Image (spheres, rainbow, N blue to C red):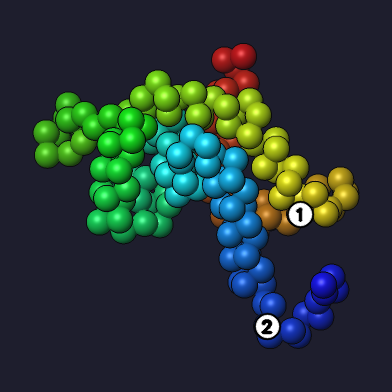
Amino acid sequence: MMTNFPSQNLHLNLALLFHLSNQFKDQLIGRYFADAGVTAAQFKVLINVYKGVVTPAVICKHLLMDTGAMSRMIARMVDSDLLLRRPDPQDKRQVQLALTDKAKRICQTFEREALDTIITDLTARLTPDEIDSLMALLLKMLPDELPARHLEYAEALSDDR
């Protein structure tokens, strides 16, 4: 197994490493929620609704999914008793999504247990200093508005506790 990658290595460029890291994270999420019958892609929809993003169009933007794929996934999630579809009170042509009790429990489990387990598995080969460095570099790389909306949610959560 290679552990030191020269920066000129064209086979393992930064974009590929981000992609592989994302796939690894999704595999860990998928494994964690497999017994609940929830895929990583479905979990991303659930956690968006849990955080208050209730329209399929906005979730599509957050997850970079096309609307057709999102509609099919939502239909499967409604059939699996994970989501409820309700008419938008302001625009009857649109729908708003809500979590079922089953889905709320999955999201609460993620907040209480799964997040720590998944992050621990994801960073198992890193030292605490490397984890801190990785976080600092990722925050530096991202546009401020992307982590900001998640920080607002995290702060609201800590206020509720």
Secondary element under disc 2, as helix, strand or loop, is helix
Crowding near the residue tagged with mark 1, few <14, some 14–19, many ≥20 C-alpha atoms within 10 Å: some
The amino acid type found where label 1 is placed reads Leu
Using residue 14 as the reference point, say whether residue 101 is left or right of it: left
Residue bearing mark 2: 11
Q: Is residue 14 left or right of residue 49?
A: right
Image vertical order of residue 42 relative to residue 159, above or below: below
At which x and y percent is residue 50? 44, 30
Q: Taking the image as drawn, is residue 55 in sight?
A: no
Work out whether residue 91 can be spotted: yes
Quadrant of res 85: top left
Q: Which mark is residue 134?
A: 1
On the rendered image, what quadrant is the N terminus found in?
Answer: bottom right
With 42 as the anchor, is 134 left or right in this view? Answer: right
Query: The residue under label 2 is which amino acid type?
Result: His
| Residue for point 59% across, 65% down | 19
Taking depth in this image into account, of 14 and 34 the one nearest to the observer is 34
Which tag is nearer the camera, tag 2 or tag 1? Answer: 2
**Disc number at residue 25?**
none
**On screen, residue 99 above or below 124:** above
